[in-house]
Amino acid sequence: MATQLSPKERMQISRQTMPEQDATVRSGNFKEVNLGFSEQLALLEAQRCLQCKQAKCIQGCPVMTDIPKFVGLVAQGDFAGAAKSLLGDNALPCISGRVCPQEEQCEGSCIRGLKGQPVAIGYLERFVADWARNCGAVAADEAPAPTGKKVAIVGAGPAGLTAAGELAKKGHDVTLYEALHKPGGVLVYGIPEFRLPKAIVAAEVERLTQAGVKIECNVVIGRTYTIPELQEQFDAIFIANGAGLPQFMNVPGENFKGVYAANEYLTRVNLMEAYRKEEGSTPVLIGKKVAVVGGGNVAMDAVRTAKRLGAEQAMIVYRRTKEEMPARVEEVHHAAAEGVDFQLLVAPLEVIGDEKRWVTGLKCNRMELGEPDASGRRRPQVVPGSEFVLECDTVVVAIGTKANPLLTATCPELKLNKWGNIEIDENGMTSLPGVFAGGDIVRGAATVILAMGDGKRAAAAINGYLNQ
C-alpha cells in the first residue's frame, strides 16, 4: 500500500494516537497503560512514512534498526516480513518499542517531523514485535554452526541480553550470569509493570534461551566468581552489570524510617511483587503522602507506583521546572493525568522525623532558575527566606545511580575512570585482553536502548576478536 501513495498523500495522514487506559482507572491498577495499535491504526501510521533514501531515523537509532524497511512492510500489510526485518536488527523489540525515548532518537531524526509530527516509529515497533510474539508466525533462523568459542556475559539486563542474542547468532557458546533470581536487570526490577509487563520480558528472554543462550541466575560476579576466574573458562567476557548503586541527597534525616532509594522501592514492588500487597511475599510501605525526589524516568516510575499502591498524595519534588525534566514527555504527561502532584522549583534540605525516627516531612527551599549550567539547563538558585516543610510519610530518592564497586574491586587490573566506571577502547575492550564492557557500567546511568546499542556493538567486536 505504501508504494501507491504519493508523498503529498502521505503528508495528509495525521499521526495516529495510541489507545490507552483511562487515567482515573489506570492510576488504581498495575496493568499496562498503553494498549497498542490495532492493525488498522498500524497500517495508517505506516503509510505516513516517506521512505527517505537517506533515512536519518536509522542513524538516530542506537541499534541501527532499518526503520524504513520494516515500516514499509507494515504499510503493505506484510507483518511477517516486517517482523523478520525488525527481529534481525533488534534483539528486544517488544521492550524497546515500549520504553525507548524515540522522541529523542529515531523519531527526533524523522524528516516527516519537520512539517507536523514524526512517524510513530516506537508504536509501530511495538505493534510488529507484539504481532510476532502473539502469532508466532516468524520462522526461527537456522541454527548456526558452533564455533567452539565460549563467551561469558555478566549481567542479564538490556546490554547483556542484546549481546547474548547477537553472539548466539554467530554460533558462539554464550552463558549469561545474573545476580538476581530473574533475568532482565533493570527491565524487571526497575521498570514498573504498567510500562513494561514482566511477561513481555520473560518472552524475550525465552526467545534467547531457545536460540541456545544459557542463563545462570543468583550468580554475583565479584562474589560467586571473579573476572579472573571467568577468564580461565571463557574465550571472551562482556561485562554489562549496570550501575545500580543508589545516590542519596546527603541531607540530615536521610536514614530515617520511611526513606527509600528508588532502586529498592521499585525492586520491592516490581521484581518482588509487593504490588500484589497481601498476596506478595515482600512488603513495602504504603505511604499516604509520598514525596519522590527527582525529575527523571525513575522518579516518574516511582511516583506513579506510589499512586497505584494507594497514596492519597503522590508528589514529585524537583528543583527545576517541567521543561527541564529529563524524564520522557509521555511519562510526565501520564503522571500528571494520573493525579501526581508536581512540587516544582523545590529542593530538599532535611528529612524530618518523629521521636521514633519515622518520616513526617521534608524541609525544603523554594528555588528560582538562573543562568544555564554545564548541562545547558538553567541553574536552580535558592529563594532567600523561602524555607518550608512539605508534609509526607514516605520519601523516595530518585536522583541517579552510580557504578557498584563489587565486581571491579575483585579485579584491580580493570582500568576505571574517576566515577568508577570501566574504561574501554574504540572496540569496547577493557584494559584486559578479551574482556569487553558496555552499558551503564561504562557510560553511567542511561537509557535501555543505549545499553542495547552497546551490547550490539560489543557483540560485533567480540565476534571479530574471536575470529582473529
Image: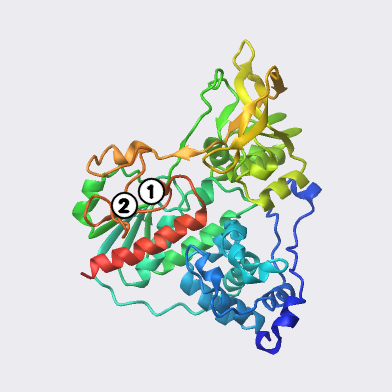
Q: Quadrant of residue 180?
A: top left
**Residue 382 horizontal side relative to residue 91, left or right:** right
**Residue 371, position in %: x, y?**
61, 36
Which disc is residue 39 wearing? none
Q: Residue at x 51, y 54 (%)?
A: 448
**Looking at the image, residue 467 lies above or below residue 197:** below
Along the line of sight, the residue nearer the viewer: 213 or 323: 323
**Looking at the image, residue 184 lies above or below residue 342:** below
Are dots 1 and 2 in contact, CB under 8 Å?
A: yes
Along the line of sight, the residue nearer the viewer: 431 or 280: 431
Give the CA distance from mark 1 to mark 2: 8 Å
Along the line of sight, the residue nearer the viewer: 4 or 8: 8
Regarding residue 311, the answer to whether it shows in the image is no
What is the secondary structure assignment of the residue under circle 2? loop
Q: Residue furthest left?
A: 232
Regarding residue 404, the answer to whether it shows in the image is yes
**Other residues around mark 2 within 10 Å, as few (<14) / some (14–19) / many (≥20):** many
Query: Disc 1 marks which amino acid?
Result: Val
Q: Residue at x 72, y 49 (%)?
A: 333
**Residue 49, position in %: x, y?**
65, 76
Query: Disc 2 marks which amino acid?
Result: Ile
Q: Residue at x 61, y 48 (%)?
A: 192
**Other residues around mark 1 within 10 Å, as few (<14) / some (14–19) / many (≥20):** many
Identify the residue position indicated by label 1 in the image: 442
Q: Residue furthest top?
A: 355
Q: Quadrant of the C terminus?
A: bottom left
Q: Quadrant of the N terminus?
A: bottom right
**Residue 257, position in %: x, y?**
58, 22
**Residue 12 horizontal side relative to residue 453, left or right:** right
What is the secondary structure assignment of the residue under circle 1? helix
Applied colour scheme? rainbow
Identify the residue position indicated by label 2 in the image: 424
